[in-house]
Amino acid sequence: MDDRPVKQSPELDRIERNMRPMYLCQQGFLGYERRKLIEILTDDQGTVNSLGLSHEVIAQRLRAITDEARKGLGDPVVLEEKFEVEVQEARGKIPCPWGHPGLYPKTHVKLERIETGETLVWSDLGIHLIEEHGFYQGRGSPYRVDPAEVKRILEI
Amino acid sequence: MTQVLLSLLALSGLGALLAFFLEVADSYLGFYGECQIRINEGEKELQVSGGGTLLSSLMDQGIFIPSACGGRGSCGYCKVQVLEGGGPLLPTETPYLEPEEVKGNVRLSCQIKVRRDIDIEIPSELFLIKEFRTQVEGMRNLTDDIKELRLRLIEPDTITFKPGQYIQFQVPEYEQCPESVYRAYSIASAAHEPTGITLVVTRVPEGLATTFIHEVLREGEEIFLNGPYGEFYLRDSAREIFFVAGGSGLAPVMSMLSQMAEEKITRNATLVFGARQKKGLFYVEEIEALKERLPNLKVIFALSNPEEEDRWDGERGRVTDVLEKIIKNGANKEAYLCGSPAMVEACVELLTKKGISQELIFYDKFA
């Protein structure tokens, strides 16, 4: 983690532009945030640290659930007797706003914790953004994964 | 203090002057004059005004390269091979290109500016792609989240396509979409009825195009599209056919079945159409009508999670469960798949295990 940026650079400005609505996807990645990208990254990094987690651990958990749920071929599947998870896939692929090589399938993963009704929504690209960039998306973004919610709902 | 202010003013003025000179210089230097786009070793040679993107320059000359994002460099579909004159590879292209594509001079045509003569290679079929002005003739809900859209062609007024192919639908600007974008949809209607096309569109969460079609578009409105595209069409052989469809993936299969009925193709064929519940099945009457005309067609509707009120006594399980059960040996069989990427992937894995060769399993590559 330690090569992650600590201040807003021209490079982060460029990435932030890629994250605005309509660049790579309809809603963009920043939601209603007015903060600079570096502030969002730093804030979530602090939350993850205070939870005793790491981006890698969170991403691995989300990926494992996604891979299992994908076997439902679009139908909801019950995992660990606790979660109902449905993976929807649309045609087309989406790139990483950081410009990493490769494209990510347009997935919409919806998890519901059966006993509480709490939900989480994420995408394949979202997992990559967490794992590689420590980016959980801006508040108000449809695919924001709040680290504290993830810890609570998924019991990591 | 005054001196500081004066220095600041002088610096700002100098900056503004430089910016002005840069603007003026760009307007002159940015004019590249007439450039030639040489296609497929001279099969076509186009004279275009330099400075535009390769994608838009080709489009202005009536040559349409598939592109889902309308040239914003976010879909990676508009790949062409650039033999000469493309300039260096741009960082905006690299996420979309595999290493072997980079080696083969494949580029994103929406990112390359035509600044000099340029030599490119594209599939000759793209010369047949046209842009169509159409009018929405009718719309109806097929399921809770799937809509049928019937478009009448205005200009040109007919289309020639191979059943199974797709078009690019131009989503115009609307409230949630400040720029026009394109999305690919398979044609569901029969090729022998060339004055209109039917599309089947599933609502996608947060989807730009599907939100437009499901919530904004109204009968009578005009829509532009271009096409046809794609290598997903019925191959001419005597092999037994398996069509496998999930959700709106039924669209191209309907067009293929209409072709078989029209051309009296009597090959043994099985359609496996999967949904979660009975309410997810559609075109049931149309399929039954086609079955009447295709005596060697077997149809299996499969529900993966039927509700009690469905009173379902048909096949239960996913399409892969049905295929597992009905295909004993894949010899002399071919398959046509259309559905979610996960469904297609699972079917390909199963069918190859059953002995159907990879080359005889066809599906939309744009998924």
Image (cartoon, grey):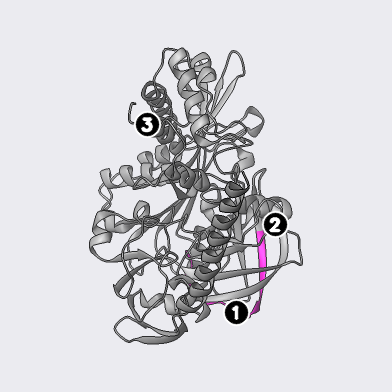
In primary-sequence order, the first of circles 1 and 2 is 1
* CA distance separating discs 1 and 2: 28 Å
On the image, the x and y values in percent for residue A80 come to: 44, 16
In this rendering, would B341 be left or right of A37?
left
Query: Disc 2 marks which amino acid?
Result: Tyr
Query: Disc 1 marks which amino acid?
Result: Thr
- For residue B226, which quarter of the picture? bottom right
10 Å crowding of disc 2: few (<14), some (14-19), many (20+): few
Front tag of 3 and 2: 3
Q: Is residue A71 visible?
A: no
Position above or below: B49 against B2: below
Query: Disc 3 marks which amino acid?
Result: Arg
In this rendering, would A105 be left or right of B104?
right
Q: Tell me which chain the residue with mark 1 is part of.
A: B
Q: Is residue B28 visible?
A: yes
Front tag of 1 and 2: 2
Residues indicated by labels 1 and 2 sit on the same polypeptide chain: yes
Q: Which residues are magenta?
A: B149-164
Q: Tell me which chain the residue with mark 2 is part of.
A: B
Residue on which the image places disc 1: B158
Residue at the spot 41% in from the left edge and 37% down from the top edge: B321
**Helix, strand or loop status at disc 3:** loop
Position above or below: B193 against A84: below
Residue at the spot 36% in from the left edge and 59% down from the top edge: B90
On the image, the x and y values in percent for residue B304 come to: 51, 34
Residue at the spot 54% in from the left edge and 19% down from the top edge: A149
Q: Tell me which chain the residue with mark 3 is part of.
A: A
Residue on which the image places disc 3: A4
* CA distance separating discs 1 and 3: 56 Å
* Front residue of B258 and B290: B258
